[in-house]
Image (tube, rainbow, N blue to C red):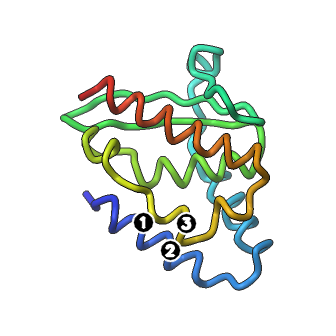
């Protein structure tokens, strides 16, 4: 299992291949397309992330001392963003999810190129993932 910093560095290296911001968006959308479908039973208001402009459903479960995340969204870019967060945080120990600074977000300049509503949504997704991790500690 890779550590959070190792996964973050992989993502930073991947995004370094793109000079154009639109190419980065296309890549994020492609990442979202590869996100496995979320079981319909989790696509309810109970699993909806509050504070997102788009609809984002997030489910988490513990297994073997680690926390795993599954999600879906009704918009392509948001689905790609949650897919990136899942790639970094899913399968990690809850304490690591709570303590990691998620430096890749600034390294790939993700937040700086999002609208304020999408940036707030990103913050809400991270807070929800950390709330799940806190609950599973």
**Viewport quadrant of the C terminus:** top left
Earlier residue among tags 1 and 3: 1
Residue toward you, 95 or 92? 95
Q: Which mark is residue 8?
A: 1
> Mark 3 highlights which residue?
106
**In this picture, residue 58 sits left or right of residue 80:** left
> Mark 2 highlights which residue?
12
**Viewport quadrant of the N terminus:** bottom left
Residue toward you, 74 or 103? 103
**In this picture, residue 71 sits left or right of residue 24:** left
Residue 126 lies, in percent from the top left, at 51, 42
- Is there a contact, CB below 8 Å, between mark 1 and mark 2? yes
Residue at image coords 64%, 63%: 110
Q: Secondary structure at mark 2?
A: helix
Residue at image coords 67%, 82%: 18
On screen, 69 above or below 86?
Answer: above
On screen, 64 above or below 48?
Answer: below
Query: Which quarter of the figure has residue 106?
Result: bottom right
**In this picture, residue 93 sits left or right of residue 19:** left
Residue 56 lies, in percent from the top left, at 66, 33
Residues under labels 1 and 2: Cα distance? 6 Å
Specify the farthest residue to the left: 65
Query: How many numbered marks are there?
Result: 3
């Amino acid at each position: 299992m890779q550590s959070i910093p190792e996964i973050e560095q992989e993502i930073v290296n991947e995004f370094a291949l793109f000079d154009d911001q639109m190419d980065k968006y296309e890549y994020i959308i492609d990442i979202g397309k590869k996100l496995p479908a979320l079981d319909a039973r989790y696509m309810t208001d109970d699993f909806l992330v509050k504070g997102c402009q788009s609809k984002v459903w997030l489910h988490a479960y513990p297994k073997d001392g680690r926390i795993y995340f599954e999600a879906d969204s009704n918009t392509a870019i948001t689905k790609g963003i949650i897919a990136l967060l899942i790639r970094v945080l899913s399968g990690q120990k809850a304490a690591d999810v709570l303590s990691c600074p998620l430096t890749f977000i600034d390294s790939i300049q993700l937040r700086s190129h999002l609208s304020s509503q999408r940036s707030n949504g990103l913050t809400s997704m991270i807070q929800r993932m950390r709330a799940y991790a806190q609950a599973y500690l």
